[in-house]
């Protein structure tokens, strides 16, 4: 099993960010509560406890995700630009 910090970095990998970007694009009302629940669920499913996750997120999972969620529109924009360049 990876240490939680490495697992969290993998969760925030480009593939995950793209998945979250698609979610955010399809659900404009999506908020940090949903992402917090998803991250918590995924961490538990992979054998980590919520205390480890809280520590890896600097003590506040929701705030951690809000900080990383700012990257999502950049991914959406980059993908739409790549698509328009191919057209």
Image: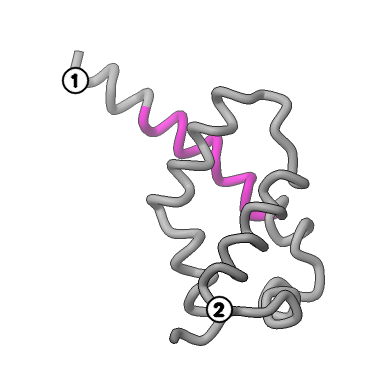
What x and y, as percent, mark residue 30?
70, 33
56 and 40: which is toward the camera: 40
Q: What whole-number distance in Å separates the C-alpha atoms at marks 2 and 1?
A: 42 Å
Q: Residue at x 50, y 59 (%)?
A: 12
| Quadrant that contains the N terminus | bottom left
What x and y, as percent, mark residue 71?
56, 46
Report the magenta residues as a range: 67-79
Q: Secondary structure at mark 1?
A: helix
Q: Residue at x 74, y 38 (%)?
A: 31
Question: What scheme was used to colour the molecule?
Answer: one colour
| Quadrant that contains the C terminus | top left
Residue linked to disc 1? 86
Left or right of 32: which side holds 8?
left
Image height of 7 relative to 84, above or below = below
What x and y, as percent, mark residue 35?
67, 48
Residue linked to disc 2? 47
Q: Nearer the viewer, mark 2 or mark 1?
A: 2
**Exactly how many numbered labels are in the figure?**
2
Residue 64, label in figure = none
Q: Furthest-top residue in view?
A: 87
């Amino acid at each position: 099993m990876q240490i939680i910090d490495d697992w969290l970095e993998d969760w925030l990998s480009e593939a995950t960010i793209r998945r979250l970007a698609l979610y955010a694009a399809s659900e404009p009302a999506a908020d940090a509560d949903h992402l917090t629940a998803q991250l918590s669920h995924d961490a538990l499913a992979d054998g980590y406890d919520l205390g480890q996750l809280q520590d890896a997120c600097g003590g506040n999972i929701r705030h951690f995700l809000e900080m990383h969620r700012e990257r999502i529109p950049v991914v959406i924009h980059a993908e739409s630009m790549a698509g328009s360049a191919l057209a």
